[in-house]
Image: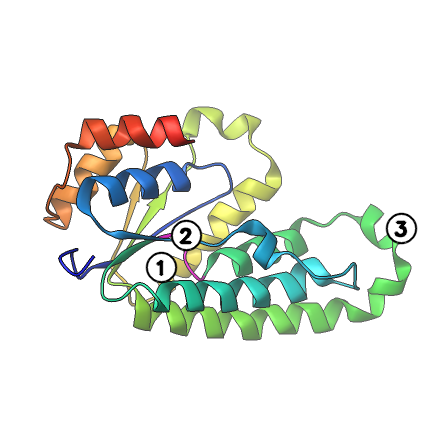
Amino acid sequence: MKDSPALRLAVTGAPGSGKTAVCTALSLATGLSYATISPELAAPVADRRLAATVDAPMRGFEQRVDSEARLGPGFVSDGSVLHEWAIAEALRRTRRLGHWLRRPQDLPFRVFEQRYLVAHAGIVVRRANTTYDGIVHLRMDPEAVADESEFRAVTDQILLQTLHETTIPYLVIGGPLEEIVTRVTGMYQLPQVIPVPDAVSAAIEAA
């Protein structure tokens, strides 16, 4: 991939927003390497206390840093180093009283969890600022907002707020897959290895 564009691009969005399809199509259309991790690699290794909000984001961050570092000067990152942290923070914010009633032993660790995620946010944001040349954020479909879970909506809100606080140029976009890929390739003046419609069709078939 020595002839691939020297652009480090990340695609963010709430779960189910279409990040994988967009990244696959962009990689096929432009020749950018595709950076991602297996969900299993970011999963907690054991059912420990607060594993989903403490263990998982750290494991995901480590795996993403390693994955992206192996790809050289140009890649498109499916989710970015912000992803697992944003998921963990959304989990923390959307917990209901029932969780604490079922697991009262976790109550003393609530302050630690909050402080840990604040500290981890600083780490992932600094890494994002020094790694990505640009970020594409896939917005939630306004017509489907009423049907979206609170967790997805909060994740989207966290990511947008975080992007606003970074130094990275970012684009918030939605719509059909082909329109997204066409606009991104044009905005960054990326070469086309194969036509965008062919890349989009291949990405849909691979999904």
| Three-letter code for the amino acid on which mark 1 is drawn | His
Which span of residues is magenta-colored?
77-81
**On screen, 16 above or below 69?**
above
Q: Residue at 52% across / 51% down in the picture?
A: 38
Residue sitting at x 29%, y 25%: 201
First reached walking from the N terminus: tag 2 or tag 3: 3
Relative depth, front residue between 63 and 183: 63
Q: Are marks 2 and 3 in contact (CB under 8 Å)?
A: no
Q: Is residue 72 left or right of residue 140?
A: left
| Residue that badge 2 annotates | 160
- Against 165, residue 139 (above or below) is above
Identify residue type, mark 2.
Leu
Q: Dot 3 corresponds to which residue? A: 102
Judged left or right of residue 136, residue 62 is right
Q: Which residue type carries mark 3?
A: Arg
Residue holding disc 1: 164
